[in-house]
Amino acid sequence: MERAKKQQLAKIAARVRLDILDQTHAAGSGHPGGSLSIADIMTYLYFVEMNVDPADPKMASRDRFVLSKGHTAPALYGVLAERGFFPREDLLTLRKIDSYLQGHPDMKNIPGVDMSTGSLGLGVSAACGMALAAKLDGRDYRTYTMLGDGESEEGQVWEAMMFAAHYKLDNLVVMIDWNGLQIDGPVTEIMNPTPHDKKLEAFGFHVIVADGHDFDEIERALEKAKTVKGRPTAIIFKTTKGKGVSFMENQVSWHGVAPNDEQHEQAVTEIRAKAKL
């Protein structure tokens, strides 16, 4: 990837991280840790990879995205606002009683949201349905879904994986945010789902492992997925929970806690300094 393009994406991702912090701080609740870990991937998806149009959010030919780990809605809202789907100032209404930006994505009221999510494990099934519908209708749009690593402990996830392989959904990309932490602690200590790569291969997937904070690797992984025919692709993105904020990185305590005034100020200062914003 060209250096200028990477720099541009890095600045957008930094703004998305600021959006995540501003949203959760204003709401006094939310899930900053896992939202920060997917900011780079989400930025690449919406600014490079996916065929979407903010002026026509329901465009029939658009690529679909399902945030299966729906509690990280601040990341999705941040990137949608940065892309122009709705005003950035609305982000500060997150979780307010009269806001359309609920704590989890709502497809009926939020422009750019393709599926309402929140109950973990269900998003992959919805994404499979979208991918199969494209096949049946003879359309060439692609479907992407983002899972949490802890979420992959859900049984329905693996039923959906069988479905995807059985129907040869090569227009489906399942992405796993492997930051190693879930709400109760390290994923491998709570209910170890590894080895993800071997299990996914056994279920019929083409598997790619990539650094979820390196735009070159994100690009290579998603470009490779487009060349895979006759079976779905899964990308295991290695990430850091709380990425970009020193006191949040790799700290399970930041899974579902909003920053207070002092913490918000420190986090914003760090991100602005690193990104030179």
Image (spheres, rainbow, N blue to C red):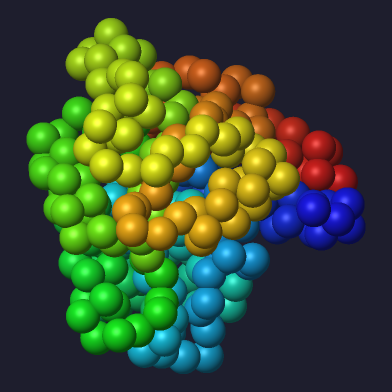
The structure residue drawn at horizontal position 69% and vertical position 46%, both measured from the top left corner, is 215
Position in image of residue 198 (x %, y %): 33, 25
Q: Is residue 74 above or below residue 159?
A: below
In the picture, residue 264 is in which quadrant? top right
Q: Is residue 144 above or below residue 80?
A: above
In the picture, residue 106 is in which quadrant? bottom left
Can you name the residue that lies furthest to the front here? Answer: 230
Q: Is residue 82 above or below residue 37?
A: below
Name the one closer to the observer, 10 or 144: 144
Name the one closer to the observer, 84 or 114: 114
| Residue 169 as seen in the image, left or right of residue 178 | left
| Residue 269 as seen in the image, left or right of residue 136 | right
The structure residue drawn at horizontal position 53% and vertical position 84%, both measured from the top left corner, is 53
Position in image of residue 225 (x %, y %): 49, 54
- Whether residue 10 is visible, yes or no, is yes
The structure residue drawn at horizontal position 16% and vertical position 46%, both measured from the top left corner, is 162
Position in image of residue 104 (x %, y %): 28, 56
| Residue 247 as seen in the image, left or right of residue 140 | right
